[in-house]
Amino acid sequence: MRVTASCTGSCGELIQGWLGNSQKLVSYGIDRFSKVTLQTGIASKGAKPKVEKAINKTLDHLRIPTAKREKLSFVINSELPIAKGMASSTADIAAACQATTAYYGRKITRDEIIDICLAIERTDSILFPTLTLFEQKNGSVRESSGWAPHFYVVVLEPEETLETEAFHSQVNERLIFQQRALFTEVYQCYVGAVKEKSLQMLGEAATHSAILNQEILAKPYFSELMKLRQHHQWLGVNVAHSGSVVGIMIEKPEDIPAVLETIKKSNVSRWYSKVSVHQSCYRGVELIEARKMNEEANDRGCFQRLRKDNDNAWLNETFAKSRVSSSTL
């Protein structure tokens, strides 16, 4: 048996800060994926301990008897860089949960997958089909907005990496708590954006959350990005609050070439060596292949067929015209 599942990544968070009695965040997915393939074979060991944990915890959740647990090997094919704030770990774990469930012919809910993710580490809200306020440590808050706004994002990716748990030190937790009054204003802006279905207000909320984050995990050349935003029609700038990537939120695809050219000519490009263009995506975790080992299948075709739009072709053309280095779409 061979099973493959995929999960979207993210470009940081729209907003993140202290609300109520704990930290909350709102993430958005992008069309950049992690894919986990699970099949019968020599058990994979050591390469991805969190994925191994996800498989074992899923088996426990499904109550698969030890006698019926086969030796499983897994392969991860990810478009998401590690430790940069693009939800690579959450995507790996969620895809592994879905693949394991399908391998044994069982079903699992989104909330059950999220609970397994939370049992392993802090988790992003990329699995939800709409923007969702989420308590990333224990999942006690999962407030769906019912809104899945579509926009484009120019992802600025440096070489710098940062593990999420390293960010959550006592010092940083104290700073985040001290910002709670200011973050409440950010949250209210987000609530207003959801109510009005306003991309402009959503961009404002994201930008102000990013500004607050500068006091905790400063992004190089952020002030220059703020100046560029004032002179261009950007919806906003969002960041990985516990990572290193930055996103420039754009409403109209025809504005993207100008954004790429502006970044290329600015000092920002000195730090952010990789630039890629994506769009918001709310597909979360999906099963994309399930077949017996003796069946023929085009794996890449199975994966690509789920991408229902042709925007990636347009974006590739944009890169070619703009001569900006990009990660693989």
Image (cartoon, rainbow, N blue to C red):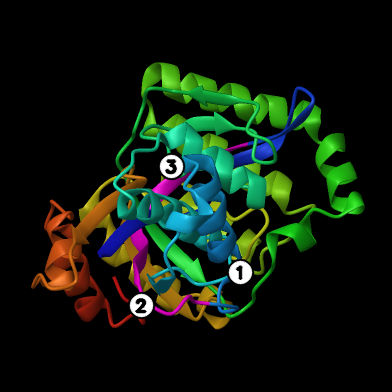
Q: Quadrant of residue 185?
A: top right
Query: What secondary structure is found at the residue carrying circle 1?
Result: helix
User: What residue is shown at x 42% (from left), y 74% (from top)?
Assistant: 73
* Looking at the image, residue 39 lies above or below residue 177: below
Instruction: Check the picture and name the quadrant holding the C terminus.
Output: bottom left
Task: Give the extent of the magenta segment.
Answer: 25-44
User: Is 42 part of what is drawn in magenta?
Assistant: yes
- 163 or 235, nearer to the observer: 163
Q: Write the residue at 32% across / 47% down.
A: 281
Looking at the image, residue 53 sits to the left or right of residue 278; the answer is right
Dominant secondary structure of the residues highlighted in magenta in the image: strand
Residue at the far left in the pictured view: 296
Of the pair 50 and 213, the residue shown nearer to us: 50
- Mark 1 vs mark 3, foreground winner is 1
Quadrant location of the N terminus in the rendered image: bottom left
Residue 310 in the image: x percent, y percent?
Answer: 11, 58
Q: Is residue 125 visible?
A: no
Q: Above or below — where is 143 with respect to 50? A: above
Q: Nearer the viewer, mark 2 or mark 1?
A: 1
Going by the numbered disc 1, the residue's amino acid type is Pro
The answer to whether any part of residue 16 appears in the image is yes
Q: Which mark is residue 127?
A: 3
Question: Which residue is painted at 44% across and 70% down in the image?
Answer: 71
1 or 3: tag closer to the N-terminus: 1
Query: Residue 308, percent across and down?
Result: 13, 51
Residue marked by disc 2: 326
Quick one: label 1, few (<14), some, or many (20+) residues within 10 Å?
A: few
Q: Which mark is residue 49?
A: 1
Identify the amino acid type marked 3.
Leu
Q: Earlier in the sequence, mark 2 or mark 1?
A: 1
